[in-house]
Every structure is written in C-alpha cells, then in structure tokens.
Image (cartoon, rainbow, N blue to C red):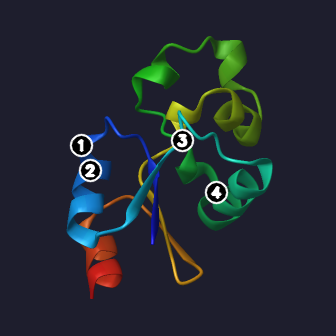
Amino acid sequence: MKIYGLKTCDTCRKAVKASGGVLVDVRENPLTLGQLEQFHAAFGEALVNRKSTTWRGLSEAERTAPPLDLLAAHPTLMKRPVIEKDGRLWLGWGADVQAEVLG
C-alpha cells in the first residue's frame, strides 16, 4: 500500500501508522503526470485542497490554471492522503476510508 502525502502532515502520519503503508512524500518525490492524471480522473476537483495555506498564497490568476498544472507546480496543493492499495484509490483519511482500507 502506498500513501501519497507529506511526511510533515499529521493525517498522513496517522494513515501510515494505522495501515502500515509506505509514505511517498510528494514534495520530495513529485508525482508524474501519469499519476496526477490518474488521481484527477478518480477524484476530480476534490484533489485540489482549496483550504490549504498554499492555495491561499496563490494569486487569482494562478488559481485559474488547470488543476493538473497547479498540482505539478505546487505538490502541497494536493488533498492528502491519496491511498493506493490493490489497484484502488482513496482520498483522505476519514472513517469511511479507514473502514475500507483497514477492513
């Protein structure tokens, strides 16, 4: 199981600890265009975290860029974690995701 996120993110650390998955820090190991496309196809606009400090730091012009371009330029804009297990993807670490991943 791979958990895509940030090593400094508390939620990502909780997901790794509970699941035993491997954390892939998207800041240190940027996602490929193929991975970004796969994640965007699965989650759509939900993949971009519009509540993040990175988002608040963007100009209005930058915010209008296509989501894949934004995520490629600013990996910390990705909502976290993205969990990949047995060919399936989940977004976040809510109770519903935990039940499916850990169950």
Q: Which amino acid does label 1 sit on?
A: Asp
Mark 4 or 2, nearer chain start: 2
- Label 4 or label 3, whichever lies nearer to me, is 3
Residue 74: image location, x then y, percent: 61, 28
N-term-proximal mark, 3 vs 1 = 1
Q: Single out the mark in the foreground, 4 or 1.
A: 1
Q: Distance between the residues labelled 4 and 2?
A: 24 Å
The residue at which mark 1 appears reads as 10
Residue 72 image offset from top left, x and y in percent: 70, 35
Q: Which of marks 3 and 2 is nearer the N terminus?
A: 2
Left or right: 52 in relation to 34 = left
Mark 2 and mark 1 in contact? Answer it, CB < 8 Å: yes
**Looking at numbered disc 2 in the image, what kind of residue is underneath it?**
Arg
Q: Which residue is drawn at 48% across and 39% down?
A: 49
Residue 35, percent across and down? 70, 56
Q: Give the CA distance from mark 3 to mark 1.
A: 15 Å
Could you tell me the amino acid type at mark 4? Gly
Image location of residue 96, percent across then percent down = 29, 75
Q: Which of the numbered marks, if any, corresponds to residue 26?
A: 3
Marks 4/1: CA–CA distance: 24 Å
Say above or below: 65 vs 13. Answer: above
- Residue at image point 68% right, 31% down: 70
Pick the front one: 41 or 6? 6
- Residue 86 vertical placement versus 35 (above, below): below
- Tell me which label, 4 or 1, sits earlier in the chain: 1
Secondary structure under tag 4 reads: helix
Q: Distance between the residues labelled 2 and 1?
A: 5 Å
Labels 4, 2: front one: 2
State the separation of the CA atoms marked 3 and 2: 14 Å
